[in-house]
Amino acid sequence: MKINTSNQYDIPGSADPIATYEEHCIKDANCALTIHQKMGNNATLLKDSLQGDILEREILVKPEAQNIPTALRTLIGDDGFDCIQSTRYDFASHSGSATIQMKSTYLGNKLLNKATFKVQCADATAPRRVSYDSETEVKAKIFMVGSSIERGITDQMKERNPILRGHTLEWIETQLNPENASQAEATYNPETEL
């Protein structure tokens, strides 16, 4: 199953809005760690490397039990959803990819979650608006319940995206405009392919 999301953010200031977003929301590992924690996950930075225009990052993510789809919790237990989120971002092309590798020996190769994403100008009429567009593919290769697990994960992603967007907006506000944080606005436009 695939899910496409597009989140737009108005970036305060006069510097290049795409470079500003990348500096504070992609390059800064604290952004990812803080958002994971606000989403109810324990997150530990394992790798954070910048070579030229290429950022490579790995984060160990341990979701809280309530953040694991019920179908998966039944199969593998509360700690069976621990994973490594690997992100690679190219600042020259303003695009990247992320994969999630399950630590569980049961789910290791049976659950695939990979995404591609791009940061770009959202609208020529709003030059300070940045769009973070992503396409995520979820595949569960588990006999008889794979499609239910895929649907559960993608439904949860759709449900939690506005919360994720809100936390990202909060991060932008505190990093770029702490005195007048309510100035930034975000919009959300989900498109889902099943």
Image (cartoon, rainbow, N blue to C red):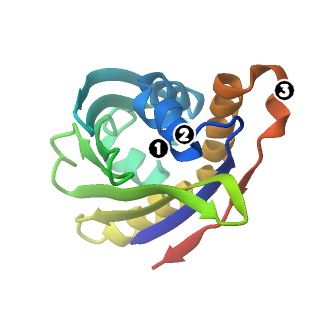
Asked where in the image residue 59 lies, by quadrant, the reply is: top left
- Say what amino acid the circle numbered 3 marks: Asn
> Residue, x 28% and y 32% (percent of image)?
57
In the structure shown, which secondary structural element does the residue marked by tag 1 occupy? loop
42 vs 75: above or below: above
In the structure shown, which secondary structural element does the residue marked by tag 2 occupy? helix
> Residue, x 44% and y 26% (percent of image)?
28
Query: In the rendered image, is residue 76 in sight?
Result: yes
The answer to which of marks 2 and 3 sits earlier in the sequence is 2
Mark number, residue 68: 1
Asked where in the image residue 173 lies, by quadrant, the reply is: top right
> Residue, x 67% and y 27% (percent of image)?
176
The quarter in which the N terminus is drawn is: bottom left
How far apart in space, not on screen, are marks 1 and 3 (Cα)?
Answer: 36 Å
Which numbered mark, 1 or 3, is in the foreground of this view?
3
The answer to which of marks 1 and 2 sits earlier in the sequence is 2
The quarter in which the C terminus is drawn is: bottom left
Lateral position of residue 95 relative to residue 51, left or right: right
- Say what amino acid the circle numbered 1 marks: Ile
Asked where in the image residue 164 lies, by quadrant, the reply is: top right
Marker count (numbered)? 3
Which residue is nearer to you in this view: 151 or 163?
Answer: 163
Location of residue 35 in the rendering, given as x and y in whole percent from the top left corner: 54, 31
